[in-house]
Image (cartoon, rainbow, N blue to C red):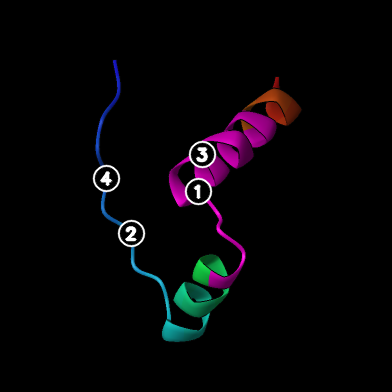
Amino acid sequence: MVKRKNISIRDDQEEWIQENHLNLSRFVQDKLDELIEERE
C-alpha cells in the first residue's frame, strides 16, 4: 500500500529539483529504504 504525505521544500530546493529532473517521491523512498536497512 502506498500512502501520500505532504512535504515542504524551500524555493532553492524546488529549483534544483526542476533543473535536475529529480523524481522527489522516488528519491525520498530510496533514501528511507537506505536508512531503514542501516538500522536493521
Question: Which numbered disc flags the more N-terminal residue, 4 or 3?
Answer: 4
* Residue denoted by label 1: 23
Q: Is residue 28 above or below residue 12?
A: above
Q: Residues within 10 Å of mark 3 (few under 14, many from 20)?
A: few
The residue labelled by disc 4 is: 5
What is the distance, in whole Å, between disc 3 and disc 1 at their CAs? 5 Å
Choose the circle earlier in sequence order: 2 or 1.
2
Question: Element under label 3?
Answer: helix
Which residue is identified by label 3?
A: 26
Q: Mark 2–mark 1 contact, CB under 8 Å? A: no
Element class at badge 2? loop
The answer to the question of whether label 2 and label 4 lie on touching residues, with beta carbons closer than 8 A, is yes
Instruction: Give, as a single range, the part of the protein colored magenta.
Output: 19-35
Quick one: SS at disc 1? loop
Q: Which mark is residue 39?
A: none
Percent position (x, y) of residue 31?
62, 41
Most extreme residue toward the bottom, as rendered? Answer: 12
The amino acid type, in three-letter code, at marker 1 is Asn
Q: CA distance from mark 4 to mark 3?
A: 13 Å
What's the residue type where badge 4 is placed? Lys
| Amino acid type shown at disc 2 | Ile
- Give left or right: position of 5 versus 14: left
Query: What numbered label is drawn on residue 7?
Result: 2
Q: Nearer the viewer, mark 4 or mark 1?
A: 1
> Mark 4 and 1 residues: CB-CB less than 8 Å, in contact?
no
Q: Nearer the viewer, residue 26 or 20?
A: 20
Q: Are marks 3 and 1 in contact (CB under 8 Å)?
A: yes
- Picture residue at 75% right of the left edge, 29% below the top: 38
